[in-house]
Amino acid sequence: MRVLDGGELTEEEIKTGLRKSVLSGKTIPVVPGSAVTGVGVDELLAMIDTMFPTPFEYATVDGADLEISETGDALGVCFMGLNDQFTGQLSFVRVISGTFRGDVDVSNLTTGTKERFGSMFVMSGKNQTPVSEAQPGMLIAVAKLKDTHIGDTVSTNPSARKLPGVEPPKPVTFYAVSAQKSGDDDKIVTGLNKILECMPSVHLERNTETHELLLCGMGDQQLAIVNRRLKEQFKVEAVLSTPKVAYRETITGAGDGHYRHKKQTGGAGQFAEVFLRVSPNINGYEFSNEVVGGTIPKNFIPAVEKGVQEVLASGPLVGCTVENIRVAVYDGKYHPVDSNEMAFKIAGRMAFREAIGQAKPVLLEPVMKVDIMIPDTYLGDITGDLNHKRGRVLGMSAEEGLQIVQAEVPLAEMARYATELRSMTQGRGSFEMEFARYEQVPPNVANEVIAKHQAEVEKDKE
């Protein structure tokens, strides 16, 4: 009001007012600078010193005030990890309350295990300065903790209150990982697991359908850093490539199949004949025995189903799992001497292949539910791009000054979306996605996928 009335504020009053506003969460200071030239670093440190709360002024846990002092039980949170080539595993801990001292036992309140705080360091770049104690507000590195990870709470009191952990964001970028040199696969997995212990927003998983090892993270640059560390620290090179899409296959019509398996060698022969029919089934996979008159003995029916299930695991279009199908065996023949389980499994497999080929098989693709957070300026560009990606915009909403676009997009179109979105929004956009369902692939896209799969099969044969 003094300024509005034409008066002026002293520098001390401005600092006091800004500090109160920062403490209340109403103001977020911004300081321009450069980490390369060092410009702005002194101003940043001065601002932190004058405007930010001290470790004793402000601390809440789940909305409740936390009493902080230099005395009493020590309490801290592990916020970062690092693999040091000389010291080994380093766990970075922010001291919340109390005083940690070296060579004492502490409790991991998150896992319920005991740890030994041995050597403690204050880090300045790569330089490590040993310290004998750490008080509230200090960031320390502790060497060789066995079972303490990012987000864990540690304390000298096993009954202390656990603090909220670090909630890593969901990954939005995926790469298939393979070894550049044959035989390095185990080394790559071992190295990546050690690196990812220090990076909670990146994880490694095995896709059971495509059988690929996937490296999942927040963007291309982050995963490139992981790959570089793998090469520098573990002397092994990995190739990152676009992962395969886990398609599914199903049928849209009915089909009949018949196969007669007859094989005669010098000894006992093999004989089995199977008739079966297939039809769509929205409830999943279903197998039924409709044989009457004992044309196929009941003890051979499980062998027929085994043959069917072998084809279900590798469909006729692109070798993916077949789902939503009903299979009924209704007739066949057997020989009292030459028939056996192997013969009926082969006959069931071949008859099912013939039937599914007649039942108008189609390709299904995973569709993802996507929430895209962007400034208003880029709304038109984003919706237009989603239409280009065969996406459907379901709705829009506003939150904290950003537009949130809800859409459904095929996973095949989202491989590089993290990089594309940053490019379209000058780094101001972000998104989250999760699996929604499987949908039929449009014929023109399906033909391209099938042709590519057949070309890969022919190449493997060569």
Image (cartoon, rainbow, N blue to C red):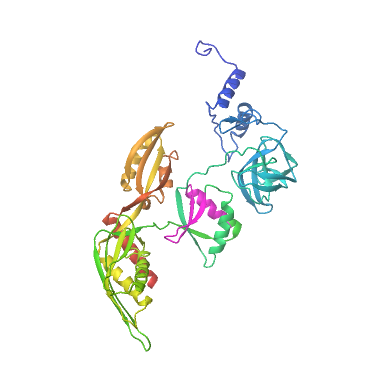
Quarter of the image for residue 458 reads: bottom left
**Residue stretch in magenta:** 202-231
Name the residue located 69 percent from the left edge and 31 percent from the top edge: 69
Name the residue located 55 percent from the left edge and 63 percent from the top edge: 186
Quick check: 253 left or right of 436?
left
Comparing 163 with 93, the one in front is: 163
Across and down, in percent, residue 150 comes to 59, 45
Comparing 268 with 440, the one in front is: 268
Quarter of the image for residue 337 reads: bottom left
The correct choice, above or below, for 441 with respect to 349 in the image is above
Across and down, in percent, residue 389 comes to 33, 48
Q: Is residue 171 magenta?
A: no
Quick check: 377 left or right of 184?
left
Outermost front residue: 293
Name the residue located 52 percent from the left edge and 44 percent from the top edge: 168
Quick check: 368 left or right of 10?
left
Comparing 254 with 137, the one in front is: 254
